[in-house]
Structure formats: structure tokens, C-alpha cells
Image (cartoon, rainbow, N blue to C red):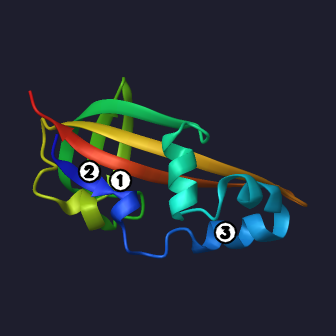
């Protein structure tokens, strides 16, 4: 399966804000699993210590849309098990491998931190890959 995006290989500082929140409000998480994005953390993730979901679906739309304010935007729409999910078509979603009819697998995970005024949830796409049919 060709990989469109792999968070583990990403060079962006994607984990910085979640690590700041964890250090302040849930240091036990880091003690148990390591700093998010570190080698130790990925080993815990791959061993199943962090819950994650895989969904498969078909790209149903790629192109320009108009929002309720009559503003134009570029979108990718995917039918994931009967639910339509829309992404802004930027970054890896702008890949030429993302086309109408393409079957995808999207792996996601969440880290939810309880804080003084309520929970903060960080949602990440871990892996996006195409399925050859």
C-alpha cells in the first residue's frame, strides 16, 4: 500500500504542544510512555499501549467548494464506513494519489488530557495509505 502520510516520519514539531500540556497536567503519562513522538513513545504506541483506530474509505470528492460565507476552498471528501469526512486539501491531502475513487486507510489516535476547566483532546492522523484494488 503506497503511504501518503506517516506521522512517525514527519519532521514537523507535531508533538510539542501535547507534550507541554502533558508535562503540566499529566506527567504520569510521560513517565509511563515517554515523551510523545520519542522512540520510547512510538514503541509503546506500536505495542498497543495507546488506543488507535483504523478506518477505510473511498475518496468521493476532490476540488473546490463554496462555504456558507461564499468563500471558495479546496477539499477532499472521504466516505469512511458510511460517514462523510471532509479535509482541507493541503499538505499530504494534496497528493496526486488522493483522487476520486481511491480507497484509503486512515489510522488515527487521540490523547485526552483532563485539565482544570475540562478536557483537552489532541487528535492526530498517524498514517494515511492507499489500498490497491
- Using a 10 Å C-alpha cutoff, classify the residue at mark 1 as few (fewer than 14 neighbours), some (14 to 19) or many (20 or more): few
Find residue 81 and report its image quarter. Answer: top left
Q: Secondary structure at mark 1?
A: strand
Of the 4 image quadrants, the one containing the N terminus is top left
| Percent position of residue 132, x then y | 10, 32
Q: Which mark is residue 76?
A: 2
Measure how far apart labels 1 and 2 are at the Cα level.
5 Å
Q: CA distance from mark 3 to mark 1?
A: 25 Å
The circle on residue 57 is none
Q: Position of residue 118 (x, y in %)?
A: 84, 54
Q: What kind of element bears circle 2?
A: strand
Mark 2 nearby-residue class (10 Å; few <14, some 14–19, many ≥20): many
- Which residue is labeled 3 in the image? 19
- Callout 3: few (<14), some (14-19), or many (20+) C-alpha neighbours within 10 Å? some
The alpha-carbon separation of the residues under discs 2 and 3 comes to 30 Å
Q: Which callout, 2 or 3, points to the residue nearer the camera?
A: 3
**Residue 9 drawn above or below residue 84:** below
Give the residue at the far right of this rendering. Answer: 116
Query: Which residue does the numbered mark 1 point to in the structure image?
Result: 87
Where is 91 relative to 49, above or below?
below
The residue shown at (77%, 69%) is: 23
Which residue: 40% across, 41% down? 107
Q: Position of residue 69 (x, y in %)?
A: 41, 64
Query: Do tag 2 and tag 3 residues touch (Cβ < 8 Å)?
Result: no
Task: Give the x, y percent position of residue 13.
Answer: 48, 76
Do labels 1 and 2 touch, CB within 8 Å?
yes
Residue 4 vertical position relative to residue 17 in the rendered view, above or below: above
Residue shown at 40%/59% (left/top)?
A: 8
Amino acid at each position: 500500500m503506497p503511504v501518503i502520510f506517516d506521522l512517525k516520519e514527519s519532521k514537523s514539531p507535531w508533538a510539542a504542544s501535547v507534550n507541554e500540556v502533558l508535562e503540566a497536567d499529566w506527567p504520569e503519562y510521560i513517565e509511563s510512555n515517554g515523551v510523545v513522538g520519542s522512540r520510547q513513545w512510538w514503541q509503546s504506541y506500536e505495542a498497543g499501549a495507546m488506543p488507535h483506530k483504523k478506518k477505510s474509505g473511498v475518496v468521493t470528492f476532490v476540488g473546490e467548494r463554496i462555504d456558507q460565507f461564499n468563500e471558495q476552498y479546496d477539499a477532499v471528501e472521504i466516505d469512511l464506513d458510511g460517514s462523510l469526512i471532509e479535509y482541507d486539501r493541503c499538505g499530504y491531502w494534496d497528493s496526486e494519489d488522493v483522487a476520486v475513487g481511491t480507497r484509503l486507510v486512515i489510522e488515527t489516535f487521540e490523547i485526552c488530557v483532563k485539565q482544570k476547566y475540562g478536557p483537552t483532546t489532541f487528535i492526530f492522523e498517524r498514517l494515511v495509505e492507499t489500498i490497491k484494488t
